[in-house]
Amino acid sequence: MLVRILVLLYLAGAPALAQTLCQPNASNGYRVRISIKTALGNQAYEWNENEMFLFRATMAFAMRRCYKTETYNVDNIIVCNQTLRVSFWFVVTSPENSTMLIPKADVEKAVSMSRHRINNAFLLTDRTLEFLGIHPTLAEPVNPDTPPWLIVFGVVIGAVFAGIIALLVSSLLQKRRKEKGMMEDGQDEEDMQVKGVENGNVLDGIYNRGFTDDDRFTKL
Amino acid sequence: MPEEGMEDSKVGEERPKWNNKTEYLLTCIGFAVGVGNVWRFPYLCQIYGGGAFLIPYLIALVFQGLPLLYLELAIGQRLRMGSIGVWNSISPYLGGVGVASMVVSFCVSLFYNTIVAWVLWYLFNSFQEPLPWSQCPLNHNNTGMKQSTPVNYFWYRQTLNITPNMETSGSLQWWMVVSLATAWSIVYICFIRGIETIGKAVYITATFPYLVLTIFLVRALTLPGAYEGLIYLFTPDWEILKNPQVWLDAATQIFFSLSVAFGGLISFSSYNSQKNNCERDAVLVGVINSATSIYASIPIFAILGFKAHTNYVTCLNGNILALTNEFDISDMNITVENYEQWFDSLNGTHPSRVSDLNLKTCDLQTFLDQSASGTGLAFIVFTEAVISMPGSQVWAVLFFIMLFSLGLSSMFGNLEGILTPLHDLKLVPKWMPNELFTAIICLLSFLMALIFCLGSGNYWLEIFNSHVGSVPLLIIAFFEIIAVAHIYGIGRFSDDLEFMTGHRPNIFWKVCWLVISPLMLFVVLVAYVVAQAQTHHTYAAWNPDYVRATTVNAAFSNLSSGTPPPPPQSLGVSKLDKTQSKKKKKNTIIFYIVE
């Protein structure tokens, strides 16, 4: 009889005890703020008891994942002070002793470790599912081995140098061709001049190359 | 006497000729249309009463810009020599004008190509996802940077790696050296065969910016907030016309924008045949230059309006979040539309709690008033706007390629103003092919411009920008117009023009050359010098320890020193209030040359 009374008292008192464990500004509790409409817009779901259950289950999962030796349950996550915002406080009790709260630092460690999974469970992000006091660790930016700008630079400078060399070479070839052409012209005129003298004809108006410095044409 | 110089000035070697008229016109237009048309003119429009600024601007164009332009093109075409040769021909005592042109062209090309190098750096970095200036690098806690913005950080730290002041030189930033080398290589390859290769290059560099501007125009007009930006830009404030500073700035802007007195235009027109209607060319180039400025300001301001709108919405959303969190109101009950009502009701019921939140006052007008010009506009304000646009990479790449084309085509004129006079002075040894000579000049300029790649390079560049390309050009132009109108003689000049264009210049041109333009130039020069002498020489410095910049009294100032340092003001985006614009203008004489 006494045992039954004690059990009844315990069952009645447990929730009350749980309530005293979880309070706003509790030393070992965290406040959570959720902004579903901001994150999802038209596809926002409603926050109700089922979602709250999912939250508690996810937190239990996070604690289990971090502290592998202890098996946390949904009952170990106590929630209170829910507002329309949606925001609420939660504390975590130890599986062995339901009156003992897990220290803040341990809870923070578990949350940080599984933050990504918690976010995804609710289709939210670090900004829309806030644990006040736990700063989100930003993802490492992808640091490729060669910075992309070097690649673009390499392509551009390669093309430019190739162009410079091509243009220089073609200018050189053009100049050589012109010089060769002038050389051949000069020799033709010389032959003509020689012919003219041999025949005794003096060709008027032809520039007499015999009196120019045509060493460059006649070098052997 | 200049008669002998009429035909070919080089014995046994023909003067290079333009392939066709289009190449010549595009080159001149490309020279005149530079980055300043994009980032200087819209800023002036904004601070000087929007549409009302067009009046002094167009008056300056007609009475000062066009006569100078016509004069330079005509004298170059007639005398068929670069700037030194031309002025030497008119009178040996005027040879200094040509030499001054060449020296100014050289100094300007040094720092102008550095700006092109910065544009290239940003262009290379635009091929990344996400854009590197959209996020700060993480600190050791991996919790992100709180002070300053990612855009500022990328510009001041990762691009410039700027030192706290000019005395601290810092070291050579290798990535800047690499970009500068690329810029000079590209300039060289376009110059390799003189106007033959330039003529081909300008088909792209002179026309591409217009294509990009049109694309941006279409894109920008569909962005939210564009309409407000445009209204803000073009709403005329007629009162501003009573302020003489406006007229001074309009005259200065036109003058620097047309790129006269560099010698480049004289060189370009010297490669023309003598029977070319240079009057039509001058009017065409001048009008197109101004039209480009006006056309460019439309997408720029649409995008600035978009940016102001984005900032306004972000500011409001910050306030909304603060209110929602404080009063535990359901998420998204307060929106941008009903913010006012919510605020009033909450302030009425819980004034103390609301005031404790320290909510920011979000005013769209304040955000629109944030003006910027020069590199601040391109590398800080615009890059920030681009992040908010969908498909940021594409817009960033397009924007920086456009800036690059604008800068490159202006570099052609700058370099031409150096090379042709040197050829005319017969300083080039006969054995040296032109390609080698151009390469030497480019290499020399690159090595000298390495000073701008130091940590303190930006400070040096601002000095060059504000002093090298301002007063000297005004003096040169003044002497040019006096030389032609009074020493060469307006009668003889009219005869030459009749020979070239087929008709004598009408009375408008003559009056301008004789009286109006020299007078305007003289007034602008005197006002400029007086304004410079009155201000304490300061430069805005970036202090890495603090979030905001301070202004440092420059060491070389010969005015009274020992004034206490002025209060910190933010760098890059100068918040210019319309009422305070006159006072602030005295302290910030920047970026006149980059027109």
Image: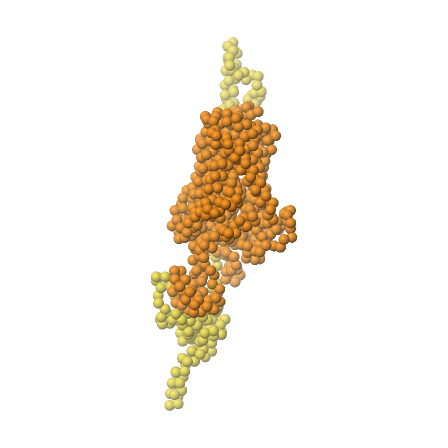
Q: Could you say where residue B180 lies in the image, as x and y percent from the top left?
A: 54, 44
B186 vs B30, nearest the viewer: B30
Residue drawn 53% across the image and 45% down it: B245
Q: How many marks?
A: 0
Image-based side of B105 in relation to A14, left or right: right
Residue drawn 55% across the image and 22% down it: A217
Above or below for B248 versus B428: below
Image-based side of B238 in relation to A46, left or right: right
Q: Which chain is orange?
A: B
Q: How is the image coloured?
A: by chain
Does residue B15 appear in this view?
A: no
Q: Quadrant of the C terminus of chain A?
A: top right
Residue drawn 42% across the image and 65% down it: B344
Residue drawn 41% across the image and 80% down it: A16
Q: Residue furthest top?
A: A200
B74 vs A220, nearest the viewer: B74
Image-based side of B526 in relation to A67, left or right: right
Above or below for B358 versus A169: below
Q: Quadrant of the N terminus of chain A?
A: bottom left
B307 vs B357, nearest the viewer: B357
Q: Could you say where residue B124 lies in the image, as x and y percent from the top left?
A: 48, 47
Q: Could you say where residue B91 lies in the image, as x and y percent from the top left?
A: 59, 28
Does residue B516 appear in this view?
A: yes
Q: Which chain is yellow?
A: A
Above or below for B54 versus B322: above
Q: Could you say where residue B125 lies in the image, as x and y percent from the top left?
A: 48, 49
B584 vs B295, nearest the viewer: B584
Q: Residue furthest bottom?
A: A1
